[in-house]
Amino acid sequence: MQWSDALGKPHTRFSGMPRIVSLVPSLTELLVDLGLGERLVGRTGFCIHPRPVVRRVPKLGGTKGFDIDKLRALQATHVLVNIDENRREEVEALADFVPHLIVTHPLAARDNLELYRLLGGIFGREKEAEALCADFERAWAALGTLAHGRPRQRVLYLIWREPWLSVARDTYISHMLAAAGWDTLPQTSAIRYPEVDLPGLARAAEIVFLSSEPYPFRAQDLRQLTERLPGIRAALIDGEMVSWYGSRAIRGLAYLRELRASLDES
């Protein structure tokens, strides 16, 4: 049986003992949840979950600018990358010595189902992958039940300050928020993470979300924003729960369900 990655490259089940390097934090977490923690031989410094497992795995740098010589020395059979999170030229350089490059690019929440099955199939963890799929479907249905019938709301999701950056509607983050009934601003953008007119869009939005990553917005930032723009409604949001795909998406859907219910009641 074959599974295709984000570039359409076919992969078959690996019959040996894999040595896996993950250059994507959310994929590192997913591998562990598929029961492959012992097969991880390398990660980035941003691969921090689950800590008891990943702390023993050698760090190779960041998702961008990783140490290619250290990676080569690990003799990995597989390297996992992502189109958004890793530089194309750095990934292409791995093809000279890595037998299997697995390229991912989930753009919508339900793309996680294919992702679970891709990695589960390649590494012989089909049962674990289907269990994750079932958990995802339950969380998806629960969020859908809550969001159904509630008015859709315009939200501004901020990921950086000065310049103020948001997310376009074709991003994974926006698709996750849309599942909870939240439509991101700006409505259209040729740039996936555009700089925005903060006062204008904040006042057009029913809620302004300040994400915990990549810029670590905190309570002080929330207070400063509401003082700067009186009358807007703003809230902090856990960026990992919205932007991390993989197994974290299951908890992310449950998190969004609780957050939507809480904000609707407040």
Image (cartoon, rainbow, N blue to C red):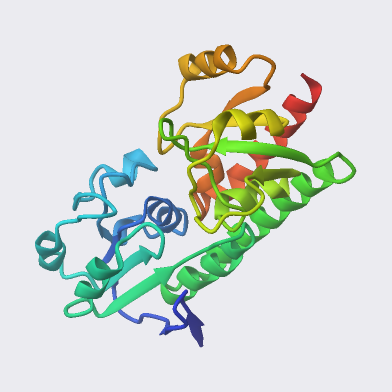
Q: In this orientation, which residue lies closer to the viewer: 186 or 173?
A: 186
User: Which percent across, then down, holds residue 252?
Assistant: 59, 43
Q: Is residue 220 left or right of residue 254?
A: left
Residue occupying image coordinates x 33% and y 39% = 52
Q: Is residue 172 left or right of residue 72?
A: right
Q: Position of residue 265 (x, y in %)?
A: 80, 22
The quarter of the displayed image where residue 70 is located = bottom left
Query: So how many labels did they put on this image?
Result: 0
- Residue 205 shows in the view: no
Residue at 14% across, 63% down: 68
Residue 161 appears in the picture as rendered: yes
**Nearer to the camera, 150 or 127:** 150
Q: Quadrant of residue 96?
A: bottom left
The answer to which of 190 and 54 lies nearer the viewer is: 190
Pinpoint residue 254: horizontal percent, then vertical percent. 66, 41
Camera-side residue: 79 or 194?
194
Residue found at the far right of this picture: 149
Residue occupying the point 68% across, 28% down: 203
Could you tell me residue 144's position as x and y percent? 79, 49
31, above or below 215, in the image: below
